[in-house]
Image (cartoon, rainbow, N blue to C red):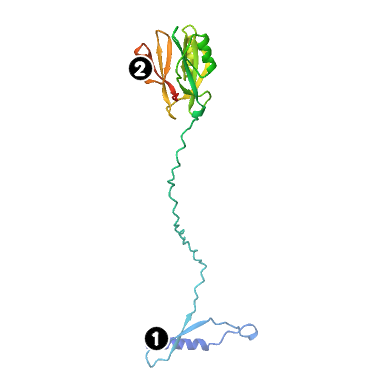
Amino acid sequence: MKFSFAIIAAVLCVSQSIALPTGYEGQLYKRTKPKVVTTTVTEGCGCPPTSIPVLNTIPPATSSVPPPATSTVPPPVTSYVPPPASTHVPPPPPPATTHPSKSVFLLRGFKSHGMDHFYTTNVEEMNNAVSKLSFKKESHAAKVYTHPEVNTIPLHRVFNGHANDHFYTTSSYERDNAIHKLGYKDEGVAAHIFATQICGSVPLHRLYNEHGKNHFYTISESEAATAAHNGYTREGVAGFVLPPH
């Protein structure tokens, strides 16, 4: 091993002592020596230091660019809480009201010859029926309205001269059927009464006597029961009216 290092050192010394080649007209070419980095190696204690040329290699620069950060920041957590649903319940609408002071008497008359009950709000008409048509005035049947009021419906009036019968109904179908098929004549609206039992109203019972061809109306249950016992048939409630007293 010592012999090898000695040979390497001798070769280096001889190479440095060789004259450079001449160039044009005896001038020496200028030769640039490569840049070397020497590394001194020492072997044992009796060997002179030797220098070994080492090429200085520099790695090429890279053009790699690191990718941008793709970190996504999460949205902030909201602490909004929607308000609770309203528990407010609106008050019910006020009940429909009428004006009893506007009500008038429903007058009642009866003609025994021909068995006809007659009802009207017109005093003059009733007086004429009593004085000229052989009717007898009876107690007031009820209190009703001559014009539409809250929750009222018209009470239609028709008359059959052949049967000598006044017929009252709140049904336009019954009215039209009586006019077109049963020989009745339209006499307009007798009054306005309630469709349901409100405002202290009472039922107006309706009965019919097939033998006498007569319709009868009363607010008295006992009177209706007596009429039913004497040949009248109950036909329900014509509507609701105010008591006369």
Residue named by callout 2: 225
Horizontal placement of 120 versus 232: left or right?
right
* 221 vs 35: above or below: above
Q: Is residue 184 visible?
A: no
* Quarter assignment of residue 138: top left
Q: What percent of the width, then of the height, locates residue 231? A: 36, 11
Q: Nearer the viewer, residue 131 or 106?
A: 131
Mark nearest the camera among 2 and 1 is: 2
Mark 2 / mark 1, whichever is N-terminal? 1
Q: What percent of the width, then of the height, locates residue 217? A: 43, 17
At label 2, the amino acid type is: Ala
Q: CA distance from mark 2 to mark 1?
A: 153 Å
Q: Nearer the viewer, residue 114 or 235?
A: 114
Q: What percent of the width, then of the height, locates residue 158? A: 50, 14
Q: What percent of the width, then of the height, locates residue 34? A: 53, 81
At label 1, the amino acid type is: Ser
Element type where label 1 sits in the image: helix
Residue named by callout 1: 4
Q: Residue furthest left?
A: 229
Can you tell which mark lies on residue 29? none
Quadrant that contains the N terminus = bottom left
Name the residue located 45 percent from the left edge and 88 percent from the top edge: 10
Horizontal placement of 205 versus 36: left or right?
left
* 71 vs 197: above or below: below
Crowding at dot 2, Cα within 10 Å, few <14 / some 14-19 / many 20+, comes out as some
* 237 vs 65: above or below: above
